[in-house]
Image (tube, helix red, strand yellow):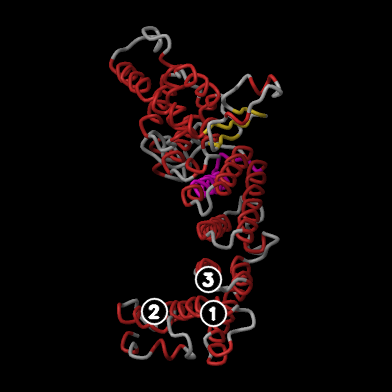
Amino acid sequence: MHELVAKLGDLLNRAPASVELLPGDGSEWFTEDSPQEILHYAPFLFVEGNLGVPHKLAYKLYLQSVPTFQECRARLRLRRSVSLPDPDAEYPTLTDDTLASSAVLLLVNPAHQSALNARKRLVQLGTLDASHELRFVSALLTLRDGAKQSILWHHRRWLLRRLHPPLPASREDPHTAATGVSGPQGDGADSLGGLCLDEGWFRTEFGVVSQACEVYPRNYHAWTHRYLCAQALATLCTHPSTSQAQRAALTEVLREETARAREWIDRHVSDYSAMQYACRLRLLWGGLRSSPDVPGSHAAQPMDEASADGPLAEHAWALVKAYPAHESLWLYLRGALDIPALSGLPIGQSIYAHAQEYAERLLSEETARDDASSVSPTDGALVRNHAVRLLAWVLWKEKKVQLEGRFVRRVALLAGTPSKGITRVDLLDDTAHMS
């Protein structure tokens, strides 16, 4: 069994393209006629860089790995207090045993804090290459249980901060000029800002996040990592040390990412994390618009029009009309209309008015009796609920009401009334004193 732990640890530490826990014990995968290159890795399935591990066997090996890892962890703690030129001088197999046992633990439990800390320690000691560890993390993020773990994304950012040097300090920023560092660095920071990165790296990270979001839908932690990448990208676009050629390349990556985010939303109309991300991307574009050094950032070319998909609120509005039963899309529309840079534009004001008219039409007495032609009878109650809440949001934005308990209860009551037509006046009844 210990040999299998070492074998599985070796396969995992090769940083396969993907990892999957497969049902059963794996006995049905191999026959006498199986190719030798397949049998060589039995009882594991390793084909074209993709690793399959029998679910039952993985848990058995997990239990076998625990005592080995505990011993390795104790030895690594000793390395902190005993200064030796070679961290493996006293324990020649320390690195190999730690890598193998921790890899098996992370396969079954990708949020194993102690295992990740042990691997961090090996990176700090110089016995584990940070680039290789980054590829290992990419493999873990193809697991459903791995893709959703915030601690694994945090570990990835820690590695990226070790791999990439900080940007030179800008004289325009008193803090960075004084410290010599243009962004938060070190183990205490959980940011990618202020790192010297290139467009290829950003495309790689965006690709890793996309794969993780396919594995685990509505993946908040993955979208958070993606936004930190986009934020670092926007920072690089405006940094004084960035050349014009680099700015052009980085701006193009941000344009691609904006279009990619909207395409994702088109295919995942319940993924509100993606919609929040799209709104925050729009805010980043607004910040770049004020920089004369960023290509396409001049006032004559509004950043909303930089994408072939058109303004963000227009995109959200089209999806609400197409799929009115999805609450996430109504929230997306509200988020897009709430962006300060857009609210004053004609397109924003137009959609703001159309959205209110649409909500009032959905809540009219005729619709309450017959349902709108665009809404199925089974979705009627949901759509009315979303429409009432949009009108309530509009009244709040116009400062005609305050979000007090009585108003919130009234909105909930009216949203649950199936057969009555509802107007803005109904929402304002008994709340006029709040204005």
Q: Earlier in the sequence, mark 3 or mark 2?
A: 3
Q: Residue lying furthest top in this view?
A: 89
Give the image location of residue 54, x and y in percent.
Answer: 53, 32
* 416 shown above or below 76: below
Residue 223 at x, y percent in the picture: 51, 50
Magenta span: 225-244
Mark nearest the camera among 1 and 3 is: 1
Q: Determine the CA span between mark 1 and mark 3.
A: 15 Å
Tag 3 residue? 330
The residue pinned by badge 1 equals: 380
Residue found farthest to the left:
81
User: In this picture, is 303 found above or below 169?
Assistant: below
69 or 295: nearer the eye? 69
Looking at the image, is 417 positioned above or below residue 42? below
Could you tell which of marks 1 and 3 lies nearer the N-terminus?
3
SS assignment for the magenta stretch, majority: helix
Instruction: Report the Cα–Cα distance between label 3 and label 2.
Output: 16 Å
Residue found at x 31% / y 88%: 433
Q: Secondary structure at mark 2?
A: helix
Going from N to C along the chain, the mark reached first, 2 or 1, is 1
**Residue bearing mark 2:** 412
Tags 3 and 2 touching, CB below 8 Å: no
Residues packed near mark 2 inside 10 Å, few (<14), some (14 to 19) or many (20 plus):
some
Do the residues bearing badges 2 and 1 touch, measured as CB atoms within 8 Å?
no
Q: Position of residue 9 (x, y in %)?
A: 50, 23
Residue 245 image point, x, y percent: 67, 41
Q: Which mark is residue 243?
A: none
Q: Residue at x 52, y 86 (%)?
A: 363
